[in-house]
Image (cartoon, coloured by chain):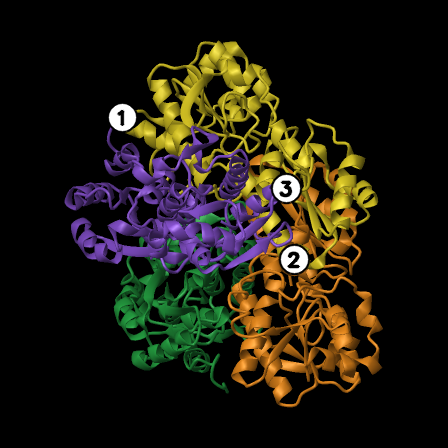
Chain colours: A yellow, B purple, C orange, D green
Amino acid sequence: MNACIAAVVRRSEVRGLKSVGILRGFEGLVGGSAMQLDAHSVSGIAGRGGTILETSRDGSLKARLEVGALGRMFAAVGIDALIVLGGGGSISAARGISDAGLPVIAVPCTIDNDIAGTDYTIGFDSACNRVIAAANDIADTAESLGGRIFLIETLGGESGHIAISSAYAIGADAVLVPEIKPDLPVLCGRLKAEMDAGKTYVVIVVAEGAGPAPNLIEPIAELVGRRVRVTALGHAQRGGPPTYWDRKMARAFGERAVDLLIDGECDAMTALAGGVLTETPMSVPVSTKKPLDEKTYELINTGAKLKAGG
Amino acid sequence: MNACIAAVVRRSEVRGLKSVGILRGFEGLVGGSAMQLDAHSVSGIAGRGGTILETSRDGSLKARLEVGALGRMFAAVGIDALIVLGGGGSISAARGISDAGLPVIAVPCTIDNDIAGTDYTIGFDSACNRVIAAANDIADTAESLGGRIFLIETLGGESGHIAISSAYAIGADAVLVPEIKPDLPVLCGRLKAEMDAGKTYVVIVVAEGAGPAPNLIEPIAELVGRRVRVTALGHAQRGGPPTYWDRKMARAFGERAVDLLIDGECDAMTALAGGVLTETPMSVPVSTKKPLDEKTYELINTGAKLKAGG
Amino acid sequence: MNACIAAVVRRSEVRGLKSVGILRGFEGLVGGSAMQLDAHSVSGIAGRGGTILETSRDGSLKARLEVGALGRMFAAVGIDALIVLGGGGSISAARGISDAGLPVIAVPCTIDNDIAGTDYTIGFDSACNRVIAAANDIADTAESLGGRIFLIETLGGESGHIAISSAYAIGADAVLVPEIKPDLPVLCGRLKAEMDAGKTYVVIVVAEGAGPAPNLIEPIAELVGRRVRVTALGHAQRGGPPTYWDRKMARAFGERAVDLLIDGECDAMTALAGGVLTETPMSVPVSTKKPLDEKTYELINTGAKLKAGG
Amino acid sequence: MNACIAAVVRRSEVRGLKSVGILRGFEGLVGGSAMQLDAHSVSGIAGRGGTILETSRDGSLKARLEVGALGRMFAAVGIDALIVLGGGGSISAARGISDAGLPVIAVPCTIDNDIAGTDYTIGFDSACNRVIAAANDIADTAESLGGRIFLIETLGGESGHIAISSAYAIGADAVLVPEIKPDLPVLCGRLKAEMDAGKTYVVIVVAEGAGPAPNLIEPIAELVGRRVRVTALGHAQRGGPPTYWDRKMARAFGERAVDLLIDGECDAMTALAGGVLTETPMSVPVSTKKPLDEKTYELINTGAKLKAGG
């Protein structure tokens, strides 16, 4: 997010606007808590995880924003228009502000990549790279230990996008997501057969919402007949310096958001679609659920490595 | 490349084919040096930098492949079709094999991302992330040291794609590429003005072909009137474990290559176009030069942070 | 371990000896499974996690080594003397071989640093750095989320050395180890008081043997009255490239082991003592339990940050 | 340094003292520029590279501190005693303050590890790990490219400690340091012989003061008859999150410094000696030059891998 904040502030300066950072999201908007931002104050932040503006600790605020009071809030923190960085809840709240007639642009920022209307949300690439790193570390010694099952639990809340995408990239043997109830006996039967046939170890990516992974240790160990070890990325998956792809997208989305406001747009979300930087009406992410990549889910979970795939 | 090799081997097994790895590229093809590959032999390699098949040390071989002898070579290493992983030179050689009537699919593998017909070549994301890492490390202490100019020299041979893309992502103050002759006095004049106005430090990304960076120390130091320090990534930029994006694309390209061969394609290069996995005739990369992203080059080098941008 | 293997092989060559690598530890010794090693075969392995020689999958073998048969095993794999790389179990088995009159040197290799007679065991620094990385990632966003408790579960088996050392380095608010039963109500009472007084988040390092961490979520959440999140490093903590300190010690221990054998030592373990490279009779690690650093444990767990320390 | 600042502040609180951070080193002391520090203000900084207190940009200030004015400066920033974090120059200046009768404790903080009286200076482990990372990245593809010479240029100013220590750890084939003039023809003769005998690539670590590495490309390429590539870590070597070892030592030194002041010490530097945390009179680092590890230098540069070593 810091990289996106920096991009917004710098682009605003270039285009002759001033930037104010609202602290702790909608909490700061309600409470009038804000800070002036300029190129100097955002210098060096782009490479840091987290956000200098902090995040709201009171999620319910988003829902309780009173339309009538919004104009006064804008005046209180001294702004004419708002750029909202956040996930589904924040974008819904942004929509509410837009409905009240105030100019607002949303930038999809969530590691979960679960926002409809855009192929990408800022943070996703960094989060997936954490799964890659864990998989690499496990691979270093897994082969020689032999005969084990490794569960990697990712974040992702109630969505399985991170889990499926990263499971595909690392060539995981299975992936469990909250959206699809797995047939554990069938899945474990396949893994057992593969291990009996000589496969030395197996990696299963478990989305947060399909876990917690420790609860899966016993059933899987019993069904496959091998020891199960868990690596749970937990909150650590949110941190760390953003990757090239995230910094590129953060800058592109941030600059686009400023340009959209200047061009008079007041109800759009920046988006990546078909590899192209664009925008979409906020109604799309608010009213639509992003479909899961079920084809890749199937590819991974039907053991495409041993059976004929599509 | 290892991740792509693993994907090819696994997909081949799934689809009922056997894989043979040709060692040291065309050198191995000429010399009949090859190894059987199966799921077991590629286990655990995907997360490692470099390639288990090594690379040719005799670049001239690509040009000297005799059409007449190619059929015998295929027979010698026991193959019916070839998947070539490599950059421009390798793809040209692959084209030659295809012209000789032998089935061959190319997979664009080069950190330089300088192959026409595809938006992406395997290795590029990992290479750009090395620039991000260097920029982060420099930023940690650059602010407090103050008043310095940091040059980051990237690889990229005679192309500036890595330099421009990573310079954009890190918000570099300037970028120098071999394709465009910079007006150093004008550029340095702008940087001097920015530093005189309070900017504490400046980062310039220098593509290999626009360097070597050490030669730029003196002229830039003189024109801007500040100390210049160089970080040259050198050969280290080629190594390290591949990123999420590279592993995802390596798997996608590798599987696609196998599927294309089975579908009877024999003269294509796997490609990413508009965010979609596809293929392109090999004539495209062979006969076309990929255009540089001049718009981004301009955005970075005209000091868009201080002046009104487009 | 790879770095140590490389050092042994290279030093042996320098001193005119040949090296044979026994595969899968004592399993390979019993089964006569070995490979010739020279400078070429160990080229490039030192920076890789894991071990090219793999590890034994049958722990019981160590205990069942028959003294009578040992001489025949040495002959079978063609060796005159043995260098054993491993933890407590392996060193005990090495002692058995030494008791049988065969020359053997032990090198303490375990991430747990729980071997008496040496201040250091190879792998410990790399393992502790994984805790640092997780703590950094958590810190990136923990502050802004606020009011949470983060558990980081480390490896370490039944020993708490990794947990205490890394908890000290990251300034954790508490550490739980298997050797000492914590007074959870007292501990949580202190953490609650600190959080009520404004501390935004709390980090507790949990050694494997004091966990599993997920079992601690409920009691801690209840006692402190805040949400608890777990990051479990799991098997990933064993992998990854070794650090500077581990590579330095691996080389120093490996070279020392060869020199000791040549000097006629046949019952020693390489050791670090008071910052000095040395050796100790194998009876020390076999018969002594390494004491826990209880002083540091107390420093961390008595909330030294708020109360007057020693 | 941040980790050490945090340790000082926390320990001070525990022991009932208040902390003030002097900004930009002696520059802030002279100018009266300081900030109040407490546990809250140092929360989360320990894992970040660089220093929140910034560093002096005017090195000459250290030498120009007027003894008479020091008492007034202490009063101006509101302090009774001073803890100085820095390298040789800073410790000399600290000595001057001590000579003026004011209580001051020095903590050796420099990546160069060139301070007499202590085996360790904060930052050294992190800096050496950067060399390891570069060496790993180079190793990934060096083998397959074949026949090349890789120079890794480290920082270290006029001292070769980083270069020798990291060259030892990575098993470099040679190391060049400013303290010892190399016999390049002899050195290159050995490397040529090794490469002619089958060694596929060679790594030479070049200390900053023995470089710049680019100037060595031509002579080495000519003498060995192979291509030479440079990786120059440059300023990036100073940044990045501190390692386990650095954070442990930063905490230990920081806490020790506070304890020493409270115990009435007023002219000491914290030190590590023989693996033990201790202190030394400031006269030691000020008047003594730390000896280079010439034995290790010889071990590396006499090609110990091929010839019989000591």
**Residue type of the residue flagged with mark 1:** Gly
Q: Nearer the viewer, mark 3 or mark 1?
A: 3
x then y, percent, for residue A261: 37, 19
**Residue type of the residue flagged with mark 2:** Thr
Circle 3 — which element? loop
Q: Which residue is mark 1?
A: B310
Q: Which residue is mark 2?
A: A141
* Chain under callout 1: B
| Circle 1 Cα neighbour tier, 10 Å, few/some/many (<14 / 14–19 / ≥20) | few
Of residues B96 and A67, the one drawn nearer to the viewer in this rendering: B96
* Chain under callout 3: B
Q: Which image quadrant for residue D217?
A: bottom left
* Residue D3, above or below C110: above
| Circle 3 Cα neighbour tier, 10 Å, few/some/many (<14 / 14–19 / ≥20) | few
Circle 2 — which element? helix
Q: Residue furthest bottom?
A: C264
Q: Are marks 2 and 1 on the same chain?
A: no
* Residue B296, above or below D129: above
Q: Residue at x 24, y 46 (%)?
A: B178
Q: Are marks 3 and 1 in contact (CB under 8 Å)?
A: no
x then y, percent, for residue C297: 69, 60
* Residue A27, above or below C231: above
Q: Which image quadrant for residue C115?
A: bottom right
**Label annotation for residue B16:** 3
Q: CA distance from mark 3 to mark 2?
A: 30 Å
**Residue type of the residue flagged with mark 3:** Gly
Q: Residue at x 84, y 82 (%)?
A: C68
Is residue B112 shown to the viewer in this render? Answer: no
x then y, percent, for residue D60: 27, 63
